[in-house]
Image (spheres, helix red, strand yellow):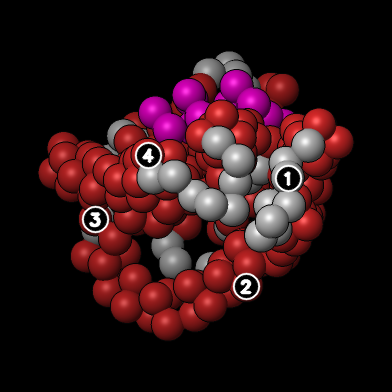
Amino acid sequence: MNYSFFDSGLLSIILSWFFAMQTIAYFLLALIPFLAEKNKDYPSRLYLTWLVICVFIFSPFRYIVFQVVVATSYPVQSFGAFFSTLWLSLYVPLVFGLLYALTCIVPILSLMLLSQKQGQKFGILRGLSWTLIFPFACMLSSLIFFTALPTTSKTLGPSSAKDIIKATNGPAAVVFKYLVKPFGPFPLPEFFELTPKTDKDMIRCHVASTYLSKSAFSYFVEKQYPDIYNSIKE
């Protein structure tokens, strides 16, 4: 195994944490007012809390946070990554924006159906519908997201394979370990069973198999797992 080939430099790690903390702070600052303020469309903060729990556990929200952290870590891995970001920023937000919009359709529709209309009481039947339908809608959104993800992620053509894998170090590894890995499942290549199966193996193999082109994926396997690469090639 050759883990060091895709390790990040100290400066890259520091900058990655700097941008990641801003991202996490943004999500938290957006969440706090949502729970703190009373919303006339929902009966109580208890239901709002249930909504947040469902989004966190059943929807692809945790994985999207991971994607954002990786994306903010990528430009600081090298000068080449920084300059390629200028090109990627022209179309990646559009492609993944469409994916996120498609993912949000089902939960938003369920919220529109379950929201309390003016002059309408929030009875037991509506309450049960709220607790049962919205989690199902979130799970359906996850199915849509992870089904479309492989096709969408292959649009990352101009990006550097080495820099994408290096972006999984630091904050991305922590987010993956505590927000993505425990809730799984997520795609992994078949040869993963031949690796030591550490967290580093898992995150790198997942990102490589999901986001890299076929040639870039072969490059990753050759550099990190030369023995496995040679055995597969034979």
Cα distance between the residues tagged 3 and 1: 53 Å
Which mark is nearer the camera, 1 or 4? Answer: 1
- The local secondary structure at tag 2 comes to helix
Secondary structure at badge 3 equals: helix
- Secondary structure category for the residue under label 1: loop
How far across and down, in percent of the image, does residue 143 sit?
A: 79, 48
- Closest to the camera, between mark 3 and mark 1, is 1
* Residue 25, label in figure: none
Residue 98: give its label.
2
Q: Amino acid at mark 3?
A: Val
> Residue drawn 59% across and 53% down?
41
Q: Residue 48, how many percent across, how many down?
A: 55, 38
CA distance for labels 2 and 3? 26 Å
Whether label 2 touches label 1, CB < 8 Å = no
* Quadrant assignment, res 75: bottom left
Residue 139 belongs to the span the image colors magenta: no
What stretch of residues is rendered in magenta?
A: 174-188
Q: Residue at x 39, y 45 (%)?
A: 37
Q: Please tell me which residue is depicted at 37% across the width and 39% down the height of the picture.
A: 36
Residue 135 in sight from this viewpoint: yes
Where residue 121 is drawn, which disc sits there? 1
Amino acid on which the number 2 mark rests in the picture: Leu
> If you read the primary sequence from the N terminus, does the residue marked by circle 2 or circle 3 appear first?
3
Q: What residue does disc 3 label?
A: 76
